[in-house]
Amino acid sequence: MLYVIDYGSGNLRSVQKAFERVGVHAEVGSDPRRMSDAKGLVLPGVGAFGAAMADLERRGLVEPIVERIAAGVPFLGVCLGLQLLFERSEESPGVAGLGIIRGDVRRLPDTVKVPHIGWNQADILRDCDLFDGIPDSSAFYFVHSYVVVPTRPADVLTTTEYGVTFVSGVSFENVAAFQFHPEKSSILGLRVYENFARRVYEGWEPAGAVEGDDA
Amino acid sequence: MHLKRIIPCLDVDKGRVVKGTNFVDIRDAGDPVELASRYDLEGADELVFLDITASHEKRDTIVELARHCAEELFIPFTIGGGIRTEDDVRALLNAGADKVSLNSAALNDPGVLAVCARRYGSQCIVVAIDAKQVSADPPRWEAFLNGGRVSTGRDAVAWAREAVAQGAGEILLTSMDRDGTKDGYDIPLTRAVVQAVNVPVIASGGAGTLDHLVEVVRDAGADAVLAASIFHYHEYTIREAKEHMAAAGIPVRI
C-alpha cells in the first residue's frame, strides 16, 4: 500500500487523487503502524516549516519517517515535504528538520517576486526513473517562498531558474523530493506519480489514463 | 525559466457552464469539470471559474463546484464571483480551490484581504479589479462594482496598490472598456498596474486575436492572459495560442 502522510497540512486529497488517476490506491493517514506496512511513503505539504515539524512531532511521526527511510522504503516528498527532509530552515530558526538530506532551506532573494508562483522549468541533471517519459526542461507548477540548499552536489536532481538557480528536485538513495507540485502540473506531473508507483510496485503498469485521452 | 500563463475563464451559473460550451465532441457541454479537463488536456496553465449564480443557494453551489473540480483537475484553478467573507474563502479552499478571487467585497472592505492573506497565505488570494477609463489625458481608470455598473470613484491603479499592500497575491485586471470587444487588451491600463505592484497581473478583457495575447505580455508586462470567447468558440486552441506566443519569443509551457 502507498501511504500519504497526514500531519494536518492541506493538499493531501490532491496528491491522493493524482495516484488514483494513474490507477494506484493511496491511503491518507497518520498511523505509524500503517506506515510500517506501506510499500511507499509520500510526504506532501503546504505551510510553514516550524509548524509542520511541530505537527509531525505531536503525532509521533518523526521517528517512524526516519526509520522507514533508513529501511529503504521508497519515499517521495512534495513542496514543504521536500524542505522538511533538510536539517533546518530560515523560515523557522532553531527548529530541527528531519535531517535526511544534508543542507538547509533559505528564503528566495528579495530581487525576485516572492512567493514564486506559476509554471517553471525543471532542468534534469541526471538519470532518474521518476522522470521516465518526461523531457528535460519540462514545466511544473510551483508555489513557494523558500528553497533547499543541499550540501552534497550529488543529491541534486533538478534545478530551476527564477532570478537565481535553485534546486527544485533532490534524489538520495530511496528518497526523492520536489519543490514543485506534480499533482498540479497536468499530464507530466501525473507521470511523476506514475513513475513513483512503478518504483514502489516493481512490474506495475499504469491503466493508461495518463497517456492523454481523458474521455 | 518562469513561464507566462494562458488562463481560460468559464462562467458558471448554478453549477453549469453558461459560456464556453461550444466544444463539438463533448458529452455534457455544461459540465464545468468536463470542460475544464478538456482545457487541461489542451494545455491551459490554470483555469478561472466565475460564478454568476444569483440566488440564495449560491454559496453551496460554488463550494460544490470547487469540490467537483478538485476531484478531476490536475492544474491550479481559481474561483471567483460574489465571494464575500473569510468563511466563503475558507469553504472554497477547503473544498480544493487553489485560489479564491475577491472583487466587490474587497472594495467594500479591503481588510478582508488582509484577514484572508494572513490566514491562508497571499498565494491563494486574488483580487479582481474591473477598471473603466474615466479620463484620457492624463489617462485615468476607476474601479467599478457589480460587473462594471457601479462606479466607486476609486483610482484603479491606487486600488491595485492598496489591495497588494493588504495581502492580495495576484491581480486579475479586467478592462470594462475592452471586455467583449475583441479589440485587444487595454495596454496602458495593464502597464500602469504592472508597474504599480510587485505581484503577478493577469490581463483580461478584449482578447480577439493571438497577437493581442502577445502584445499585453510583451508591451504591458502581464504575467498571464485570461480569455474566454476566443477559446470557448474554438477560434483558436490553447496550443495555437501558445505556439504563437512562443514564436514571438514569449516563454510558455508547450
Image (tube, coloured by chain):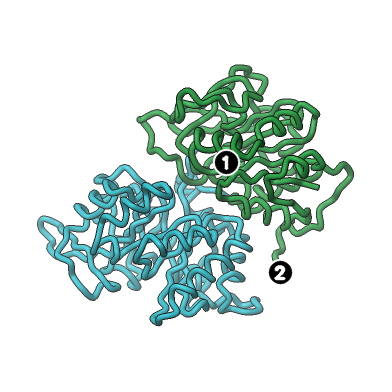
Sequence-wise, which precedes: disc 1 or disc 2?
1
Q: Residue B110: percent from the left, percent from the top? A: 25, 56
Q: Indicate the position of residue B24 as horizontal and vertical percent values.
A: 61, 77
Position of B69 relative to A132 (above/below): below
Q: Which chain is cyan?
A: B
B189 horizontally vs A25: left or right: left
Do the residues marked 1 and 2 share a common chain? yes
Query: Could you say where residue A99 lies in the image, as x and y percent from the top left?
Result: 62, 23
Q: Residue furthest left?
A: B137
Does the rendering let one see residue B192? no
Q: Is residue A129 visible?
A: yes
The amino acid type found where label 1 is placed reads Phe
Specify the label residue A215 is tagged with. 2
Label 1 marks a residue whose chain is A
Is B168 rendered above or below residue A59? Answer: below
- The kind of secondary structure element at disc 2 is loop
Q: Nearer the viewer, residue A33 or B196?
A: A33
- Marking on residue A180: 1
Where the C terminus of chain A falls, by quadrant? bottom right
- Res B143 quadrant in image: bottom left
Closest to the observer: A8 or B81?
A8
Query: Chain A appears what colour?
Result: green
Q: Amino acid at mark 2?
A: Ala
Where disc 1 sits, the SS reads loop
Indicate left or right for B57 with A214 as reference: left
| Displayed quadrant of residue A67 | top right
